[in-house]
Amino acid sequence: MAAPFRLYNTLSRTVEDFVPLQPGRVGLYVCGMTVYDRCHVGHARAMVIFDTFVRYLRHRGWAVEFVRNFTDVDDKIINRANELGEDPIALSKRYIDAFHEDADAMGLLRPDHEPKVSESIEDILALTQELIDRGHAYVADGSVWFAVETFGDYGRLSGQKVDELRSADAADGKRSGADFALWKAVKPGEPAWPSPWGPGRPGWHIECSAMAQSRLGSTVDIHGGGLDLVFPHHENEIAQSECGHGGEKYVRYWMHNGLLTMSSGQKMGKSLGNVINVEVALANFPAQTLRLYYLQNHYRSPLPWGEEALPEALAMLSRLYEAKEVAEALGGEGDADQIAREMGPDAEAVLKLGRELPERLHAALDEDFNTSKALGDLFELARAINRFANLKKAKKRGGPVVAPALAAFDLIADATGLLAQPTREFLEEVKTKRLAALGVTREEIEAKLAEREAARVAKDWAAADAVRKELEERQIVVMDKPEGVEWRVKLT
């Protein structure tokens, strides 16, 4: 049976008990990319948050139908295509392929449906005609406009006042400044489709209403997207959907993630020239780094971005993997409670935290998907593992004590996608990507370690220490262990 959870609803501005249309099922629609360029790390926050949200709901027993669209017909796409001398649909197809490359590299689940505007024209035309027939839209010079004044609840999601608004769509045929385009009459050099009102293309907002309806029905359980979409996009979706469906509620719960913010307070955006593409980030950092970076703050909060954002996230993530590695190395058999009592408070603490973590994880994520709280509990467990592992007898006898902690790490991986890599694979990926960023090769490091070993064999301790210091200056940490010498890249 699906476990109950609570979610902040942007519409009511309160955390509410989630009650679906159908018991045990969730219809989730998330606004996707306008595909005129590569995906950047600002876009990726919503992608990772909703990927993790879907994973968690399925982990808790929910049957989730996940829809995320592609806007492949848009002014930005047309402008970029004109700049490059390329067909707009071909350009958007190229960037959809690039998006999938980035999403797959980040380890994201594919949605159940990924509708495109260019393939949803019939649904868009049908909804537009329904709005005209119901008296909520009008035709002017081959374009169709939604008459905002016909929807009395306009502004309830965003708090906007109709008499103070003007939409971004401009044309002589508009009756009111707030009215927005459902269908745009054809212009030279633009892609166009036939319609009852003349050739043209869809307006921005109508596309999501039509695609959500075609996949999930007239009412959606949860509609997600970035906070910057509340107005005008989601406000307009509500108006046209509810008017087109005779007043039937469009969305039961609106879920909006906060945005990445620069030190200047700006959001990250291509038009602002402050973006870092996902492919660039993934060339220098393991994909799990991005997941932890996005999940460290509550999804509704703004998330600061700067040069140290990913290095700091990688250092945090490495601490978790290193604690997992420490726990995996502990051996022994026997009764965990008895061993913990014999070994003292640090053993009892790690056993208790390991057993409690599943309940604490569920409690945090069931209450408005609080990944920040869940990660805090996880780091508490990691610190407890490290304290316990320092005990003399932990190496040979500590295995049963940390077994619940290791099971908890597996639970985290299933529920959130975090810590999903095998430990050694992650640590090797850190070496590969961070060495490339530092401009250091493995061959250089191995040569220096061989030089150090030769100095140690000759008992030239000063020379051996000098090599260690030289490596440390190049951000390489040397670790002498009973089983041999290891090295790792120094992290923040």
Image (cartoon, rainbow, N blue to C red):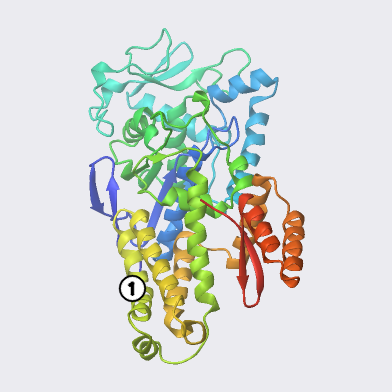
Q: Is residue 164 left or right of residue 464?
A: left
Q: Residue at x 64, y 25 (%)?
A: 88
Instruction: Label 1: state its secondary structure.
Output: helix
Q: Residue at x 52, y 66 (%)?
A: 322
Q: Residue at x 57, y 50 (%)?
A: 106
Up-down relation of residue 472 to residue 90 (above or below):
below
Task: Give the tally of numbered discs.
Answer: 1
User: Of 386 and 482, which appears nearest the observer?
Assistant: 482
x and y percentages locating residue 92 in the rendered image: 62, 32
Furthest residue to the top? 172
Q: Quadrant of residue 416?
A: bottom left
Up-down relation of residue 126 to residue 300 (above or below):
above
Q: Residue beneath label 1, please?
A: 356
Split into 4 quadrants, where in the image is the N terminus? bottom left
Up-down relation of residue 275 to residue 201 (above or below):
below
x and y percentages locating residue 214 in the rendered image: 47, 43
User: Of 213 and 167, which appears nearest the observer?
Assistant: 167
Crowding at dot 1, Cα within 10 Å, few <14 / some 14-19 / many 20+, comes out as some
x and y percentages locating residue 457 in the rendered image: 74, 72
Q: Identify residue type, mark 1.
A: Glu
Whether residue 3 is visible, yes or no, is no
Whether residue 268 is visible, yes or no, is yes
Q: Quadrant of residue 148?
A: top left
